[in-house]
Image: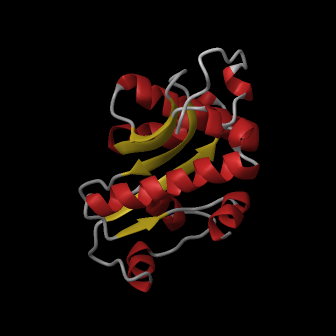
Amino acid sequence: LPGPPASSTRAPSSRRPAEMALHLIVAHSPAERDAARRVEAQVFLQAFGMTPEVMEQEYGPYEERSRFVTVIDEATGSALGAARLILPDGAGMVKTLTDVAGAPWRLDVADTLRAAGLSGGRVWDVASLVVDRRYRTGAAGAEVTLALCHGIWRYARDCGVDGLVTVLDDRVLRVVRA
């Protein structure tokens, strides 16, 4: 996407995605990963009241296996949205499968994977899908959200993943179904 004209004086937070040079990436550098974590933490704090301590408790054990598909503003290096993918451990477990095996769901993981046609397959977890509130509505929200969904699909496909699991908030589920 083309960036804003050199004479533009609009603040980064007031620019629309069409005025920004955006990149859909798999975050590899520490700066890219930090940008993804920042937008994830910001959205989870605003939407669910999850403090940094709660985020560490929930996602810290999975940090080494986390990958971030991220929409980055080239001019500022900030993330407009991100998706955290968690790769399986040696036993094939990911956060969502661990979560649904416990309260309140108490689902049998093997039965769940079998019912989804994923038994014995390579399964990754879409542990979070977040968009900065400034870019969540209208065309901007659709552009960032669709880019993230495309990035998840493309990255998983390119890595030979057979299926994805996730637990979605009702608001996110409505967007994904639209």
The relative height of residue 73 versus residue 170 in the rendered view (above or below) is above
Instruction: Provide residue 156's location: percent of width, then percent of height.
Output: 34, 59
Identify the residue shown where x is 35% and y is 77%: 118
Which quarter of the image is occupied by the C terminus?
A: bottom right
Residue 49 appears in the rendering: no
**Vertical order, 83 against 114 (above or below):** above
Which quarter of the figure has residue 30? top left
Residue at 71 percent across and 15 percent down: it is 9
- Which residue occupies 59% across, 47% down? 144
Judging depth in this view, the residue of 76 and 43 nearest the camera is: 76
Front residue of 9 and 99: 9
State left or right for residue 86 relative to residue 75: left
Indicate the colouring scheme. secondary structure
Label total for image: 0
- Reply above or below: 112 against 66: below
- Is 87 situated above or below 56? below
Residue drawn 49% across the image and 27% down it: 74
**Residue 108 locus on image (x, y percent):** 45, 75
Q: Is residue 4 visible?
A: yes
Report the side of 76 relative to 139 (left or right): left
Residue 96 placement (x, y as % from top left) = 49, 59
Q: Is residue 160 left or right of residue 109?
A: left
Q: Quadrant of residue 114?
A: bottom left
Q: Could you say where residue 24 lies in the image, as x and y percent from the top left?
A: 45, 43
**Horizontal relation, residue 135 to residue 112: left or right:** right
On the image, which quarter does residue 105 sit in? bottom right
In front of the other: 27 or 56: 27
